[in-house]
Amino acid sequence: MNDREEGSGLTRRALIAGAAAAAGGAITAGATRGLVQDAADPTKVPGARPVVVGSRSPHETPEKLLSGSMGGSSRTPLQDLHGIMTPADLHFERHHHGIPQIDPASYRLLVHGMVDRPTLFTLDDLKRFPQVSKLLFIECSGNGGGAYAPSPSPQHTPQSVDGLLSTSEWSGVALSTLLEEVGAHAEATWFLAEGSDAAVMGRSIPMEKAWDDAMIAYAQNGEAIRPEQGYPARVFLPGWEGNASVKWVRRIELSDRPGMFRDETSKYTDPLPDGTARQFSFAMDAKSIITYPTYPRRLSEPGFVEISGYAWTGRGLIERVEVSTDGGASWHDAVLQAPVLPKCTTRFRHGWEWDGGPAHLLSRATDETGYTQPVRQQVLDARGPGTRYHSNAIRGWRVASDGSIEFAPV
């Protein structure tokens, strides 16, 4: 018989090929429906239109952990983040009397005291100066207090332990530029910063920091600083305890002595065993925390696990991070993920083959000064039990044979 059917424009080969294609299409469509569980096929429905302000997928729901009231705080979900940048809306908060709402048109920053030309700067004035922009971490000096407690909760998460830590790109004007503009006196040894919040937060800062890398920041992650971060402008002191980076700054006074503000006498000092107090302990010490795997996650089965987390130091660069899976009996160098920047969080990663047995995961950081993160007893020996700040002892996580994980520092 002729390959072409009479009265038809089709050949048998074409009919057979068409039938096979149809059958294959039916199988593929059925398999696809099974994979997406009868969800709407996005290839068959027009997508959403552009919007003036973007939002996350409804499937992604990271949140800050709130505590306190007017003088409270919120903690960054470290375990939910990737890379080193913190989204602005997930940046931790710490306030002493709520968040003021300030009109940028009426904002003023007074720089006075031991200067030739006392000056009142508007926000526009600040933005006319050359801009500096850096990736930097900021950390509350009370971060990690839960790890220093005598019996820390095994249900701690990275967020509840060290969530008073965030990293952003901070932009603004170098404080040294403003000091040159007003004619700072060489005899000035401190600058006193005061905020516009209801607590009128005040801190005294050595002038060496002002001339080094302090800035007046007005932008974060490419946008104006948000109100909870100090809008319209704040002091930013890279690597130093967060409370010294006074938010909503309204006044900077140059002086030859510290101001001895309420917030640097009744708070942010450590009583020591010999009856003295540790004061003006600005720089944040080297520190690290594993953020995966951690409570409340569970390892489903033995096999490869990539341990990952953050390391940071207020004294420059992180040079090394070591990871232990046996409670400190042995240590292995982790890989530092680029970029590794000064006074910025650094991602570390370490490949681990879990054999299904009990394990105790630890991390310890070493910075470029040679300082290595201590165990809790070393901190206790140096400062005594009364300390509330700068808790940087080694954090850890205990893995059970069933894959469950608990917080277990050393």
Image (tube, rainbow, N blue to C red):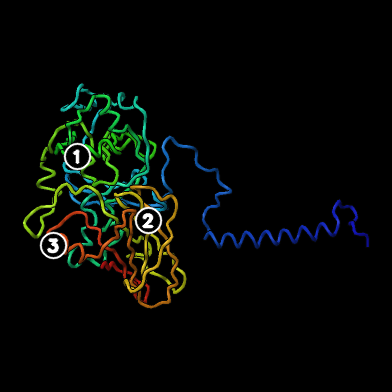
User: Image quadrant of residue 367?
Assistant: bottom left
User: Image quadrant of residue 194?
Assistant: top left
Classify 10 Å Cα crowding around label 1: few (below 14), some (14-19), many (20 and above): many
Is the C terminus in the top left, top right, bottom left or bottom right quadrant? bottom left
In three-dimensional space, the C-alpha distance between marks 1 and 3, rounded to whole angstroms, equals 27 Å
Q: In this view, does 82 lie above or below 217?
A: below
Q: Residue at x 27, y 68 (%)?
A: 408
Q: Which amino acid does label 3 sit on?
A: Pro
As drawn, is 274 to the left or to the right of 193? left
Secondary structure at badge 2 equals strand
In three-dimensional space, the C-alpha distance between marks 3 and 2, rounded to whole angstroms, equals 30 Å
Q: Which residue is drawn at 19% across and 25% down?
A: 115
Q: Which amino acid does label 1 sit on?
A: Ile
Residue holding disc 3: 385
Tell me the mark number nearer the camera, choosing from 3 and 2: 2
As drawn, is 94 to the left or to the right of 47? left
Q: In this view, does 70 lie above or below 108?
A: below
In three-dimensional space, the C-alpha distance between marks 1 and 2, rounded to whole angstroms, equals 28 Å
* Residue that protrudes farthest toward the front in the picture: 186
As drawn, the label of residue 319 is 2
For marks 3 and 2, the one nearer the N-term is 2
For marks 1 and 3, the one nearer the N-term is 1
As drawn, the label of residue 205 is 1
Residue 101 is situated, as x and y percent measured from the top left of the image, at: 23, 33
Secondary structure at badge 3 equals loop
Residue 333 is situated, as x and y percent measured from the top left of the image, at: 40, 64
Q: Which amino acid does label 2 sit on?
A: Glu
Residue 210 is situated, as x and y percent measured from the top left of the image, at: 25, 36
Mark 3 and 2 residues: CB-CB less than 8 Å, in contact?
A: no
